[in-house]
Amino acid sequence: MTEILRTVDDTRSLVAGWKRKGLTVGAVPTMGALHEGHLSLVRRAKAECDRVIVTIFVNPIQFNNAEDLAKYPRTEEADVNLLAELDVEAIFAPSAAEMYRDGFGTKIRVGGVADTLEGVLRPGHFDGVATVVTKLFGITQADKAYFGEKDWQQLQVVRRFVADLNLPVEIIGVETSRAENGLALSSRNARLSSKALAIAPALHREMQKAAEALRDGGDKVQVLQEALEAIEAAGFEKVEYLELREASALKPLDALQEEPARLLAAAWLEGVRLIDNIPV
């Protein structure tokens, strides 16, 4: 039976019991509104750990837009049912007041990899992510934590502060889950109309074409400009960025080199901001 926990103390008590038995703990941090992408993380955790705890918390301090926070889907009852079907041992679903008690005054700031792309466009976002994830690691005492590669920059930020702070948790990245048409699964997709959902796969499609052109030796500036124009012509209102970056530190690349590279994009469709990335 899946246990639903609301407090830090109850969660620590449960996990302490697991640890006394020598059991390994896997954590899957989420903001709820679960879809197949989240469930793929849970299945991976279940396969690799003795016990799994999924956290569901819409973290207010990582939103730099109050309207986006208000609109973020909250579907706890459905989420709990999905996780129960996967035999998840525990769900930690605290309130904001439980996570950020009176007088809370600490934030973790990550430099380097967090200072570009999303870090520039969403000031303070990664401070909020790093702070809440560090808290969740402390509360769950996870041996392994699972994150989707769809949020590629976030994954690199988490890996950076875990290494920098010597946190005793292994970070596992799991491949992006996609619909048959290539659209990356996201909780925000639920806010798109049927018309927009038909347009949305163009983001991934054009990124794939651009990646192939870059591998064939195409000029980066020309290839990315053509892809950007194609995405907007498909019906996207605006492409915020379409960038070729080194895969881990996300340093800009003028051309493909021997080191792993990633193509990353953010674009607006019907007032919803979609992100995606693929290896090149």
Image (spheres, helix red, strand yellow):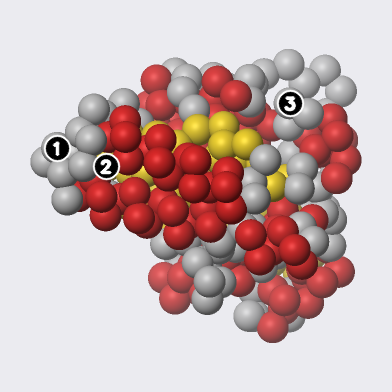
Q: Nearer the viewer, mark 1 or mark 3?
A: 1
- Residue type, mark 1 in image: Gln
The answer to whether 188 appears left or right of 244 in the picture is right
Element type at mark 2: strand
**Image quarter of the N terminus:** bottom right
Residue at 21% x, 42% y is 218
Q: Quadrant of residue 97?
A: top right
Query: Would you name the residue on which mark 1 appears?
Result: 257
Q: Nearer the viewer, mark 2 or mark 3?
A: 2
Q: Earlier in the sequence, mark 2 or mark 3?
A: 3
Residue at 42% x, 62% y is 175
- Marks 1 and 3, how far apart in space? 35 Å
Q: Is residue 212 visible?
A: yes
Query: Would you name the residue on which mark 3 appears?
Result: 64
Residue at 44% x, 53% y is 206
Residue closer to the observer: 50 or 243: 243
- Marks 1 and 2, how far apart in space? 8 Å
Residue 242 screen position, x and y as percent: 45, 37
Quick one: label 1, few (<14), some, or many (20+) residues within 10 Å? few
Residue closer to the observer: 77 or 187: 187
Query: Would you name the residue on which mark 2 appears?
Result: 261
Q: Quadrant of residue 126?
A: top right
- Marks 2 and 3, how far apart in space? 28 Å
The answer to whether 43 appears left or right of 250 in the picture is right
Up-down relation of residue 177 to residue 228 (above or below): below
Residue 135 screen position, x and y as percent: 63, 37
Quick check: marks 1 and 2 in contact, CB under 8 Å? Answer: yes
Q: Earlier in the sequence, mark 1 or mark 3?
A: 3
- Residue type, mark 2 in image: Ala
